Amino acid sequence: MDTRYLQSFVAVAELGSMAEAARRLDLTPAAIAARVKALEEDIGLPLVQRSGRSVRPTEAGLKMLDRARNVLRDVRDLRAVTSDGASLGELRLGVFVSAMTSVLPLVLKRLYARFPDLSVFVAPGSSVELCRQVTTGALDAAIVVEPQFAIGKGCTFQALFEERLVVVAPKALARRKAHELLATEPFIRYDRSVVGGQLADRYLRDHGIGVRQRLEIDNLMAVAALVGQGLGVALLPDWGPMWNSGFAIARVALPARAPVRRVGLIWATHGPRAGLAKALLAEAQAVCKGRA
């Protein structure tokens, strides 16, 4: 059985699309379809089925999916143990959306200075999903917001910096008090499916603040842009790139103790890439030293 066929099947099953799997693996959709068909012929059962424009695993495909992931992980590990476990091979790194432009480039610049021949695969996603993938071995490490649940055995989380919640308001409203702004101005809510949005929602409930919600969205820069247009106020992590964006926004501190969003690295403690994950941690700590 060709492991490339397994890789294509897993990509299709996880992404729900032949086209997206093709982009991820740098192949054509026809090549991905051919690989999956060859695997189905080898297994003797259909593994995926189309549903409109999406593709999902069949019952047989679902049964095979976790084992296929394990096989791919084992193959990667076998390749890694032939090297020194740190400077060679491919690092599979997850990064939550807000860190893709604010943290990742600086960290990778330092990491490549140490390991010029290193190959890195970057998987964007939500912190919760990225933590799950590190736990299952699909990723070696991930830059995430600290999860609100216990991480899996064999994994470690190390905080890099904290971002306190602040009210983000149009500049014209900068002199008003935080709670007054939240209670009276239209509210642009940071998505409650992510940790920062959950912290904001909990703060509002704990302080009995009712808001006039205008919309809910999962993108810090988009929220800042909307606030800059005078469409409302928001309760967000104090994320640095917002203040360098040129938007007409102001930071208004909360009067009570502000919740914090902790950003850090989660990695598999044991395994052939644990040493490389620690090197990544050291470079991330150097980049993030002194950040709020």
Image: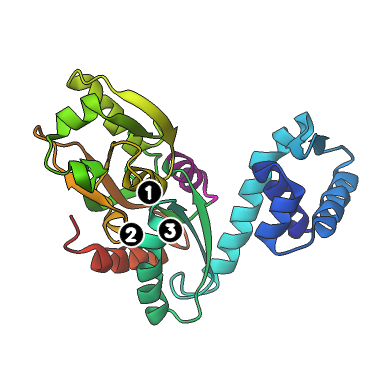
Pointer 1 local density, CA inside 10 Å: few below 14, some 14–19, many at least 20: some
Pointer 2 local density, CA inside 10 Å: few below 14, some 14–19, many at least 20: few
Q: Quadrant of the N terminus?
A: bottom right
| Residue 272 screen position, x and y as percent | 47, 62
Pointer 3 local density, CA inside 10 Å: few below 14, some 14–19, many at least 20: some
Residue drawn at (31%, 64%) of the image: 284
Q: Counting residues from the N terminus, which is met first, the one under dot 3 or under dot 1?
A: 3
Q: Disc 2 marks which residue?
A: 245
Q: Amino acid at mark 2?
A: Ser
Residue drawn at (89%, 40%) of the image: 44
Q: Which mark is residue 104?
A: none
Q: Disc 1 marks which residue?
A: 225
Say if the magenta span includes residue 102: no
Q: Disc 3 marks which residue?
A: 100
Residue 106's image quarter?
bottom left
Locate residue 148 relative to residue 108 in the image: left or right: left
Q: Main secondary structure of the magenta part?
A: helix
Query: Looking at the image, do the residues carrying marks 3 and 2 touch, with CB atoms under 8 Å apart?
Result: no
Regarding residue 163, the answer to whether it shows in the image is: no
Locate residue 47 relative to residue 255 in the image: left or right: right
Q: Amino acid at mark 3?
A: Met
Query: Looking at the image, do the residues carrying marks 1 and 2 touch, with CB atoms under 8 Å apart?
Result: yes
Distance from label 3 to label 1 (Cα)? 18 Å
Local SS, label 3: helix
